[in-house]
Image (cartoon, grey):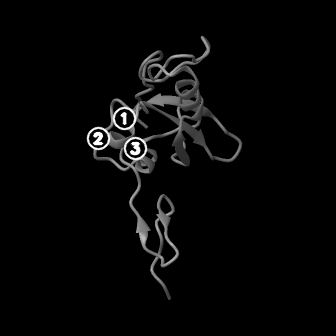
Amino acid sequence: MGERRNPRRAYDREGREIAPPTVGSLRDQGETTASVYCHARGCGHHAIISTDRFPADLPFPDIALRLRCSVCGSRQVVVMKDMAAYYARCTSGAGPATGLPPSYRVIGRDVPWPDRQW
């Protein structure tokens, strides 16, 4: 029986783990937000969060280990690159939040963190 693979990691053809980007390396590229989805049955909540509160050396996919859904409390969350912010930055040629729609709200910047004891 083979070694168990980490579901938050990518692997090359030989089965070696590919090191994920860290929060700090993405910040260096201008990425300061993340898209979070709840995969709990019947929830499907989605939020955009600021990565400011996470340490720079944290692997980006491991942000999910530190979060709970603010709607249902589930830990079945997935963290992905915030593609809306990425595309807005690519097309505007300016700073991280330039070109985002006015309705775009980032938890930790525009909206307070829902820090609660569960």
Kindly identify which residue carries mark 3.
66
Q: How crowded is mark 2: few (under 14 residues within 10 Å), some or many (20 or more)?
A: some
**Nearest to viewer (mark 2 / mark 3):** 2
Is 116 in front, or is 61?
A: 61
Kindly identify which residue carries mark 1.
27
Distance from the alpha carbon under mark 2 to that under mark 3: 14 Å
Residue 48, horizontal then vertical, whole percent: 53, 29
Q: Which of marks 2 and 3 is nearer the N terminus?
A: 2
Residue 66, horizontal then vertical, whole percent: 40, 43
Q: Residues within 10 Å of mark 3 (few under 14, many from 20)?
A: few
Residue 88, horizontal then vertical, whole percent: 57, 24
Which residue sits at x=45%, y=23%? 96
Q: Which of marks 1 and 2 is nearer the N terminus?
A: 1
Q: Is mark 2 on a helix, strand or loop?
A: loop
> Disc 1, disc 2: CB below 8 Å?
yes
In the rendered view, would you say 103 is above or below 47? above
Q: How crowded is mark 1: few (under 14 residues within 10 Å), some or many (20 or more)?
A: some
Q: What's the residue type where badge 3 is placed?
A: Arg
* Residue 102 sits in quarter: top right
* Residue 55 sits in quarter: top left
Kindly identify which residue carries mark 2.
56
Q: What's the residue type where badge 2 is placed?
A: Ala
Which residue sits at x=45%, y=41%? 67
